[in-house]
Structure formats: structure tokens, C-alpha cells
Amino acid sequence: MSSMYFTEEHDFFRKSFQDFLQKEVVPHIEKWEETGHIERFIWEKMGEMGYFGLNYPEKYGGLDLDLFYTVIFLEELQKINSGGFAAAMWAHAYLAMTHLDKEGNEAQKEKYLAPSISGEKIGCLCITEPFGGSDVSGMRSTAVKKGDTYILNGSKTFITNGVYSDYLIVAAKTAPELGNKGISIFVVDREASGISATKLDKLGWRASDTGEIAFDNVEVPAENLMGEENMGFPYIMQHFALERLIMGINSHARSEWALDYTIQYMKDRVAFGKSISKFQALRHKVAQMASEIEVCKTFNYVTAKRLNDGEYVVKEATMSKLISTKVADEVAYDCLQMLGGYGYMEEYPLARNLRDSRLGPIGGGTSEILREIIAKMVMDGKTYKPAT
């Protein structure tokens, strides 16, 4: 299957990225997991290597490569066993920067996208609200036009890179009376007066800074409006396909890593006079996990290929996230079980893997919401089209 999607150039990129992560990132992971603060130098090094610009235009410093370089980027980030570090990187590169690339005008791209690709600026995407959760259309944040500015008020929560980022891509209602047809998107500088952020204490993804952000009469220049006014909701919906596929790919990669680690442990662990990899009950559990991971990975690759070819894969990406995150949770649980008491110890990596995995069925749209989206499409004949 690898040769169907990955060329020799892809393989070379994978190896070089693996080497980079082992040399530049892995030695710092434990510190970042403890502090919840990924130091600035690694963003700059990632930028220098071009890792933030894989699928962005060369005009702004990107490499304009196909989506399977992104697949490799996501897979290898998962295999250093820090969901928080991985999330900080891909939330910057594929949440904040995707909106800049797709809805930003020339001036916005020069000011924010180019330095984001180089690692000089860090971005975050602010959509979820304390009272909204998965209900994007129910957001309460407002941006009221006043002369040449918008006055932004409201709050956002569960925002990856929400504390240490340099700019924020913010969704707010510019016409509240229109409901989801009255949402707009803005790029907002961190130093703007009236912005405050509080770091949240999470079960997993410990290395990433996840913030609750308040906007108190923040003056946003009208030139910071992204795209058309009141088109924010379809912009957001359009990019959920990529986000959900990303989380599906993250899940199959995380599961592969956990299973590989577990198989090696089982081969080394001796009980009752033989390696526990020889016990049929455990072997069959591994066989089941390996099969489910492979099915997810194959489906995710097919979906990535279709997205790369320009198809709007909202149904398939939603399915990818729904099933892949479920399998990842089950794999994390069962792999930890294979280690017995050692699996429950923090010095063994599966404890972190289990905690990090649990966010999969929650973030980017809960599994409950995803099932309803899929049900509308397969049962009610609902169709979705991209906004742009």
C-alpha cells in the first residue's frame, strides 16, 4: 500500500523528519510535558526546516507539496508519544494557517501567513466557547462594527496554543440576529488591549498550552476581517473536513506506535516460563488490534488521496475521525493492559498514550455530533458544499 501513495521522495522526507524529531524534539519532551510550555526555539527550527509550509504557496515561503507530506508529518509527530507537542504543531499549521491561506487577503498573508510558515509567529484558532461546545452556531461572541474597527467581546475555550500564540483567528457574530449566517472571522494580534488568557489544566496533551480566552472590548481593525462578512460559518464548516481527517490520521499513527511498543514488550516479557507473546489469548488480541488499525489507515489514506485531488470529503473525513479515534482509544486501553501493572506506571509510555488518546472522540467535534452529521448524509440525503 505504501507504494500507492508514497514516492521515494516521500520516504526520504519521512526519514529526515524522524531524524529531526529525535535530535531536536525528543530530548525536550519530558520538560515540555511537565511545564506545559513548548519553548520558542523549536517553532523556529521547525520553520527553518520548512515543516510548517508543506502544503502552502511558495510565494509565502511554503513548499506547495502534496497532502501525503502532511500525512507523514502527522504520523511521525504521533510516534514520539506527546500528543500535546503534536497538537501544538498541527493546530498552528493546519487550523490557524489554513484559514489564513484560504480566507486571508494579500496583506494578511504577508503579515501573518509568511511568518507562520517560517516559525516566527504562532497562531491559534478560536471557535469553541464555554457554553457552545460543538454547537458552533450557538456562539455568543460578538464583533460590532464601529467606524473603521470592530469591537470584539466574548470568550473562547479549549484553544490549543491559546496562551502563547502571537495571533488569534477568531470567530464572532457580526449579525447576531442572523444566527449561523451572521458569523465572521478575524485575525487578531495577541497584544491588542482587552485580551486575556488562562491556561487550562488537562488530563492529557500536557505539553500543549490550552487556553480559555476572554475578549473585553477589543478593538479589531476592519482590515483584519478575513473573507466576507457573515461568511464565517461556512468557512469554518469547510475546513472541518481537513481537521477531522487530521485527527483520524493522528489516531491510526498513535495506535500503530502503541501496538509496536506493546509487541516488543510482549516478546521481552517472560511469564510462566515463556514470552507472553506466545499466549494465544494475547496473540489474538494483538491480531484484532492490528487488523482494526490497518483498516483505519487504509481508509484514511484513500480519503487523503481524494482530498488531495480536490474532492470535498466531508462525509469520509467525519467517518475517519469517528472510527479512528474510537479504535485508538480501544488500542490504548488494551495495549496498556498487556503491560499489566507496568502499564499504569508513569515511567512507561502507555499511560501518557492512553491520556492523550482520550481527547480524540471529543475535540474537533464529538463522536455524538459526528454520528448525527453522518446520519443526515446517509439517511436524509443531506449534502454539503465548500464555501469557496
Image (tube, rainbow, N blue to C red):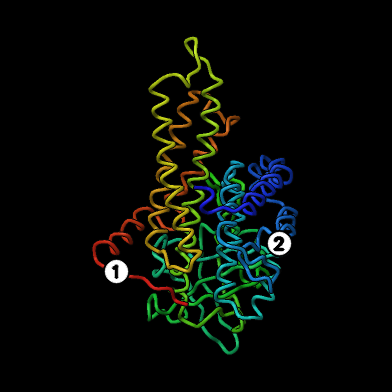
Q: Position of residue 9 (x, y in %)?
A: 65, 54
Residues 388 and 72: in front is: 72
Q: Which residue is mark 1?
A: 382
Question: Does residue 200 lie above or below 242 as drawn?
Answer: above
Q: Residue drawn 67% across and 42% down? A: 29
Q: Position of residue 17 (x, y in %)?
A: 67, 49
Question: Does residue 161 lie above or below 235 as drawn?
Answer: above
Question: Does residue 109 lie above or below 95 as drawn?
Answer: below
Name the amino acid type tagged 1. Lys
Question: Does residue 340 lie above or below 59 as drawn?
Answer: above
Q: Residue drawn 61% across and 71% down? A: 194
**Element marked by disc 2:** loop
Q: Which residue is mark 2?
A: 119
Q: Residue drawn 42% across and 67% down? A: 136
Q: Is residue 263 left or right of residue 374?
A: right
**Measured Cα–Cα span from mark 2 to mark 1:** 40 Å
In which image quadrant can residue 176 be found? bottom left
Residues 7 and 357: in front is: 7
Q: Along the polypeptide, which appears first: circle 2 or circle 1?
A: 2
Q: Residue drawn 71% across and 47% down? A: 20
Within 10 Å of the Cα at label 2, are there few (<14), some (14-19), or many (20+) other Cα atoms? many
Instruction: State yes or no: discs 2 and 1 in contact (Cβ < 8 Å).
Output: no
**Element marked by disc 1:** loop
